[in-house]
Image (tube, rainbow, N blue to C red):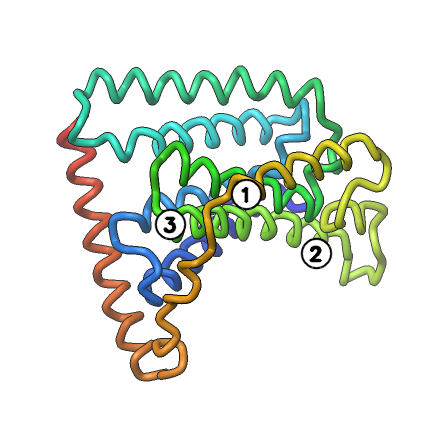
Amino acid sequence: MANFQTHLNLGIVVSATTTLALHTAALINGSQTFSFFVLGVIGSLLPDIDSKTSKPTNILFSLIGAGLAFVTTLPWFGQLSPLQLTLIWAGVYVLVRHGFFEIFAHLTVHRGIWHSLLAVAAVTLTITNVAFWLWHESAQAAWIAGFVTGIGYLTHLTLDEIYSVDLLNRRIKRSFGTALKPFSYTDRWSNLLMLMIVVTLAWFTPPLTWLTTLPLHIVIDPAALLDQFRTSSEQLWTQLLHWWQHFIRTF
């Protein structure tokens, strides 16, 4: 199994690549890139929430809490006072770090339902609904937020499976097949509950009509794609610098 640092590093790389590609294709704007990047990194760490006692799990929930607190407060920058932003940030962090951690510690089994494609669907749809109904993003932005998080989650499961194969000794470890699986092979009740969650979340997801407006001409024209990629990279870097300066001034 890959260690925490490996998952974090790959999550950062994959999330940055995914976010930049979406920005290049004009599917997200510069103000959204950093938030989606954070969601992707969080998604790449999420599967290990079913590990109860390891030190990386505690670090994981701290990062998830901080990341979700940041994503929650970011839309309110410039609208609320620094004190209000701090209280919201702290509240979200404490709720995730201590509340959610205890709940999952009692209800989950490592390499169980949370290491499955069914969980990928559940997490993707959860973020999509949260972005649409709670963060009031457009249907397109909400689905992309869920997609980026799901890509990060799937990256984690894929990496765990890769580490289950010892290429040097030419053997397959006993953990092979326990990460990237369609559903739990041992707990039918967790499968049923997760399936119910997925169906319920799918019912409330925003419409997909925005797919008909995708700028496919950029994908077809390599020259336009390269030019857009260069422009997007410059805009993304400028946006990140602007956000960081604003963050420093606010706090």
Where residue 247 appears, x then y in whole percent? 20, 34
**Residue 5 appears in the figure:** no
Q: Which residue is mark 1?
A: 125
Q: Residues within 10 Å of mark 2 (few under 14, many from 20)?
A: some
Mark 1 touches mark 2? (CB < 8 Å): no
Q: Secondary structure at mark 2?
A: helix
Whole-number angstrom distance, CA of label 3 to CA of label 1: 13 Å
| Residue 162 - label | 2
- Could you tell me which residue is drawn at 21 percent across and 16 percent down? 83
- Where residue 191 sits, quadrant-wise, is top right
Q: Say which of marks 1 and 2 sits in front.
A: 1
* Residue 59 rendering spot, x and y as whole percentages: 52, 28
Query: On the image, which quarter does residue 81 sit in?
Result: top left
Q: Amino acid at mark 1?
A: Leu
| Residue named by callout 3 | 141
What secondary structure is marked by label 3?
helix
